[in-house]
Every structure is written in structure tokens, then in C-alpha cells.
Amino acid sequence: MKDVIEAGLRARLVVLSCCHTACGEVMAEGVVGMARALLGAGARSVVVTLWAIGDEGTVEFMSFFYDALAEGKKASEALNQAMKCMREIEKFKEVIYWAPFVLIVKAVSIGIPGSFRIPTNADIWTRNQ
């Protein structure tokens, strides 16, 4: 993670499409893991997974996700669309195939004192419904 933080990353979106990429060590400052390191290095948003994911379902999910990005959708919209598409396929409709993917967005201040907060996955999910 030290190497990632020191890299000076300039990416709008980083996708970690392998198992348990949202995991990390729980500390007083929160969960310290690869996603946090990427955000600290300069990435504006990171897609990570909450649990082990299978190869076949991940290929399908990422295909939908990247197709939506190629259509010009925002990362949050593309993630939501990929989830909906997966739920429409009998083989991949179970939660295990589409729900482990989450978008973590770097918090930004809008200039109002006391307004700084990190958006939660619930905020992102609600916004996309």
C-alpha cells in the first residue's frame, strides 16, 4: 500500500475486480486497505468487492459495467446498470453475483463549513434508484 500511496495516481476510476478488495485492517481512522490507499494516492473513485467472487459472474458483470461506461454513464450509474442486468439473467440473479461490487468515492467539500462527510454505499445506492 505504501507504493500505491507514493505513486501519485491521477485516475478518475480504479476497478479492483478480484476477491475481497474492499477488505482491510480496521483501525481508529476506519478500514485501511487497498481502496483507501488508492484514494489516498489520488484516485477519485474505486470499485471494490466485499467478498469472494467467481470468475464467470465477474466477467459478465464487468462486461455490463464497462459497456455502460463506454455509453457515457457515470461510474455509479454503470454499476447500477450492471447490477440490474445481472439480476435479469437467471444464472446470475442471486445476490452473490452482483451485490459484492461497491463504489467508493473520494469525499469532497462543497465549501460549506461542517458539510464534509464521506458518502456511504447507501447514499450511492439511493441516488441510483
Image: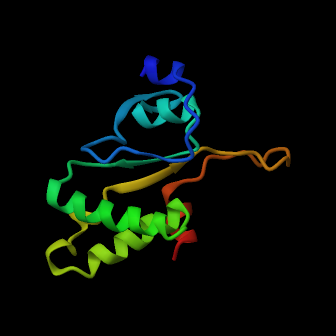
Percent position (x, y) of residue 89?
21, 79
Q: Is residue 33 left or right of residue 127?
A: left
Query: Left or right: 49 with respect to 46?
Result: left
Q: Is 26 drawn above or below residue 72 in the view shown?
A: above
The residue at the point 51 percent across, 68 percent down is 77
- In depth, the one of 40 and 118 nearer the eye is 40
- Where does residue 70 sit, x and y in percent of width and height? 47, 65
- The quadrant of the image that shows the N terminus is top left
In the image, residue 20 sits, relative to residue 96, either above or below, namely: above
Write the residue at 57% across / 25% down: 8
Q: What kind of colouring is applied to the model shown?
A: rainbow
Q: Is residue 23 above or below residue 62?
A: above
Q: Is residue 2 left or right of residue 86?
A: right
Task: Name the residue: 33% across, 49% down.
Answer: 49
Residue 81 falls in image quadrant: bottom left
95 or 6: nearer the eye? 6
Q: Residue furthest right?
A: 112
